[in-house]
Amino acid sequence: MQKIQTQGIHHITLVGADRQTSIDFWEGVLGMPFVFEQPNLDDANQSHLYFDPGDGRLITIFTNEDRKPDAEPAPQDIGCVHHMALNVSQATFRQIADRLEERGVQHSGPKDRGFMDSIYFRDPLGLLIELASYRFEPPAGVSMGQVMLEAHKMRVARGDYNIQEIHLADAIEKLTRETQQSLSEDRSARNPYQS
């Protein structure tokens, strides 16, 4: 038996209300370019809107002009989506609370996640949205996931509760040493400030 190997998210499709609500939120609040629209090929009563979240992947929305926005929180039962997390820069993260408040949107305020910062709020249809910003940049040629895996191993080995910045820094140093060559035979830490 063989695995069916995935290579990333192709797209995520959400059930929306009317067309303009989707455009106003995904592009007008979150800045995702509205890049494509066609009928829902499985239901002619719906339109299929495509938005680029910033990484070239797609978030798509099924809309129907007979559906009206309902801000009641979306269900978070077994099998349901708990929340959708979107990546933002640290510069953008520092502006989120003010920009949501300008629109009268309630939010969680900034949350310290150790390896990232997060803020939560609901879209106009009740879906919980997380805007998240990593506190690190992986070394060239290394993925975020590889840094997280190495930081996790270090956290567990040290008996720490959750990943913190020290784990990230140490993981980045280790991965840099493993993936980037040097002419030095000894790459250990040193102190050139000692006399």
Image (cartoon, rainbow, N blue to C red):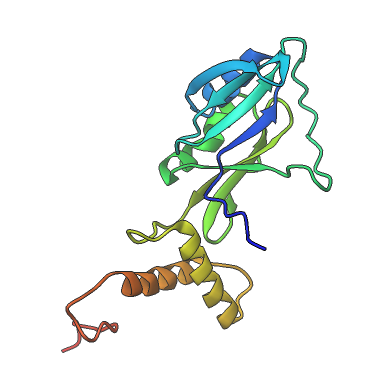
> Which residue extends farthest right?
77
Q: Residue at x 76, y 26 (%)?
A: 71
Q: Residue at x 28, y 69 (%)?
A: 180
Q: Is 166 placed above or below 18 here?
A: below
- 188 vs 123, left or right, is left
Q: Position of residue 95 (x, y in %)?
A: 48, 37
Image quarter where the N terminus lies is bottom right
Instruction: Choose between 49 and 18: the one closer to the eye.
Output: 49
Instruction: Choose between 1 and 122: the one closer to the eye.
Output: 1
- Count of numbered tags: 0
Q: Which residue is drawn at 43% across and 43% down?
A: 89
Instruction: Choose between 31 and 106: the one closer to the eye.
Output: 31
Q: Is 30 placed above or below 2 here?
A: above
> Which residue extends farthest bottom?
195
Q: Position of residue 29 (x, y in %)?
A: 54, 25
Q: Is 92 placed above or below 176 here?
A: above
> Which residue extends farthest top?
65
Q: Where is residue 21 in the image (x, y as percent from the top left)?
A: 64, 17
Q: Where is residue 115 in the image (x, y as percent from the top left)?
A: 52, 60
Instruction: Choose between 138 and 167: the one closer to the eye.
Output: 138
Image quarter where the C terminus lies is bottom left
Q: In which quarter of the image is residue 4?
A: bottom right
